[in-house]
Amino acid sequence: MVNGTIVNYYLHCKRQCWLFYNKVNLEDNSEDVHIGRILHELKNDDKQSEIAIDNIKVDKITNEYVVEIKKSDADMEAATTQLEYYLYVLRKKGIERKGKLQIIEKNVTDHKIHVIEYSSSMEQKMESLIREIETFLDEEIPPEAVLKKRCKRCAYYEYCFI
Ligand code: SF4
């Protein structure tokens, strides 16, 4: 079943998406995941606990916004599409919100915020993307690993290249 993380990974790296979906779990000590854990703890300190609705988990929901928090703006397309997916799923349940993407970078006090408005074109894009991802996840084997700059920060780096 598609969820926000799968949408994000599909945009970021299809191989990562396939490995994650097929539960190729790796013990990971990468800097990226470590920062992720710290962020998670910080959020909990702020009492901004994750909210789970069916198969989606959002960082925070207010009367106006669904808030998604990221630790970098390295892949804005993936982060934005993940948030659009949340808006889409919530809208299907009658919950109408705008999206707010907050980038909380290490050593940066001025956090970047991107606001996303729901639209009918976004809805169409999401419906077709979800179908595309479902078809992709039915594949028997993952796509080949192609080394990119981002791979060094990925939990699957050793699995893919060592
Ligand atoms: S190491 Fe690179 S190719 Fe392998 S899953 Fe991660 S991002 Fe994709």
Image: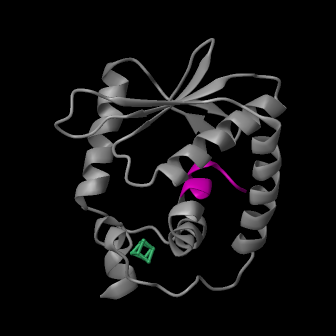
Above or below: residue 73 compared with residue 9:
above
Residue pushed farthest top? 63
Q: Residue at position x 81%, y 61% from top?
A: 131
Describe residue 76's horizontal placement relative to residue 73 as left or right. Answer: right
Q: Residue at position x 82%, y 29% from top?
A: 93
Task: Give the quarter of the image for residue 123.
Answer: top right
Q: Residue at position x 75%, y 43% from top?
A: 122
Task: Give the quarter of the image for residue 129.
Answer: bottom right
Q: Residue at position x 76%, y 22% from top?
A: 95
Is the magenta region chiefly helix, strand or loop? helix
What's the image's color scheme?
Answer: one colour
Above or below: residue 9 compared with residue 93:
below
Residue 135 position, x and y percent, is 78, 71
Describe residue 49's horizontal placement relative to residue 132 as left or right. Answer: left
Residue 17 position, x and y percent, is 56, 67
Above or below: residue 29 compared with residue 116:
below
Residue 22 position, x and y percent, is 59, 71
The image shows a total of numbered marks equal to 0
Q: Which residues are magenta?
A: 1-8
> Which of 154/121 is in front?
121
Above or below: residue 132 compared with residue 120:
below
Q: Which quadrant would the N terminus be assigned to in this image?
A: bottom right
> Which of 48/71 is in front?
71
Describe residue 31's horizontal placement relative to residue 136 as left or right. Answer: left
Q: Which quadrant would the C terminus be assigned to in this image?
A: bottom left
In reply to whether residue 3 is colored magenta, the answer given is yes
